[in-house]
Amino acid sequence: MSTPQLVVHRDKELMAEAAAARLITKVVDAQAARGSASVVLTGGRNGNGLLAALGSAPARDAIDWSRLDLWWGDERFLPEGDPERNVTQARAALLDRVPLDPARVHAMPASDGPYGDVDAAAEAYAAELAAAAGPGDHGGVPTFDVLMLGVGPDTHVASLFPELPAVRETERTVVGVHGAPKPPPVRVSLTLPAIRAAKEVWLLAAGEDKAKAAAIALSGAGEVQAPAAGAYGRSRTLWLLDAAAASELPRSLYPPASA
Ligand SMILES: O=C1O[C@H](COP(=O)(O)O)[C@@H](O)[C@H](O)[C@H]1O
């Protein structure tokens, strides 16, 4: 487990631009070292903001887009192309405008796909992850260089909501989620064990409505009550916040440079 590090930016636009710049560096370094990079995308406003900023970043084409594997932390279980699907939003924000290898874009299954229900869809995604994992990888998933998570106002990350069974999962890497309090109620999500297999986990929180969630998750809450508290990476856990989302953090947590 890595101790969370915090970076607080002036506002959500700057946070998205800085996170995009940080992601470019990570991906370029991983591609230089291993030939490819693997990134897990998040849905939500902050995740899509980061993708849009990445699209406008001057250095965006330092990334070799054809050698980038993209996975998702969660998905709303809706028909292909539904505007509420995380992959649809990611395509609109950036993915349709960069030369990705379609075989490396690992979208989670849609509700009108080949799987009968969300649990079968989750199993299929777990199998896809397991097939991509090599002998040196951890926990039945490939090595994710960076796994990003938008933090919900209720402290949810991916589709792991407080107190629901999915956040208690200790064996499976992907689960079907039923009864999510945020629509739509049926979703597919990576579990905490899969998230914790990532090298780096970045939690994105911008906006006043994230302030309580950040304060709770970073103040020692349990992961069942505050799923964001259970999201950490093997070598790094980074909270990327804007000033509004950081406004309720205990002073002791506030990064020295921002104090
Ligand atoms: O529903 C979801 O919400 C969270 C957070 O979204 P936000 O709009 O409040 O930032 C997101 O992380 C998750 O991927 C998504 O499915």
Image: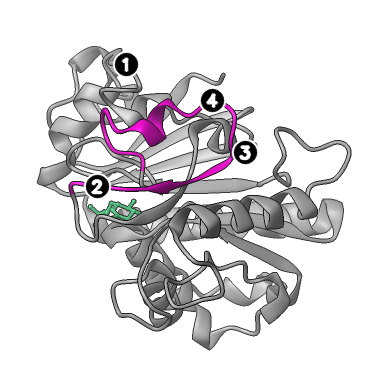
- The image shows residue 5 at horizontal and vertical percentages of 44, 27
Decide: few, some or many residues near mark 2? Use Cα within 10 Å; few <14, some 14-19, many ≥20.
few
Q: Which residue is mark 2?
A: 179
* Mark pair 1, 4: CA separation: 15 Å
Q: Do the CB atoms of the residues marked 2 and 4 lie less than 8 Å apart?
A: no
Q: Do the CB atoms of the residues marked 1 and 2 lie less than 8 Å apart?
A: no
Q: Which residues are magenta?
A: 160-181
- The image shows residue 251 at horizontal and vertical percentages of 19, 16
Decide: few, some or many residues near mark 1? Use Cα within 10 Å; few <14, some 14-19, many ≥20.
some
SS label for mark 2: loop
* Mark pair 3, 1: CA separation: 20 Å
Q: Does the image show residue 196?
A: yes
Left or right, residue 21 beside residue 85: right
Of badges 2 and 4, the one in the foreground is 2
SS label for mark 4: loop
Q: Which mark is residue 222?
A: 1
Q: Which residue is mark 4?
A: 170
* Mark pair 3, 2: CA separation: 27 Å
Of badges 1 and 2, the one in the foreground is 2
Q: What residue lies at 32% left-to-right and 16% top-to-bottom?
A: 222
Q: Which mark is residue 198?
A: 3
Of badges 3 and 2, the one in the foreground is 2
Q: What residue lies at 64% left-to-right and 34% top-to-bottom?
A: 197
Type of amino acid at the residue the image marks with label 4: Thr
Q: Quadrant of the C terminus?
A: top left
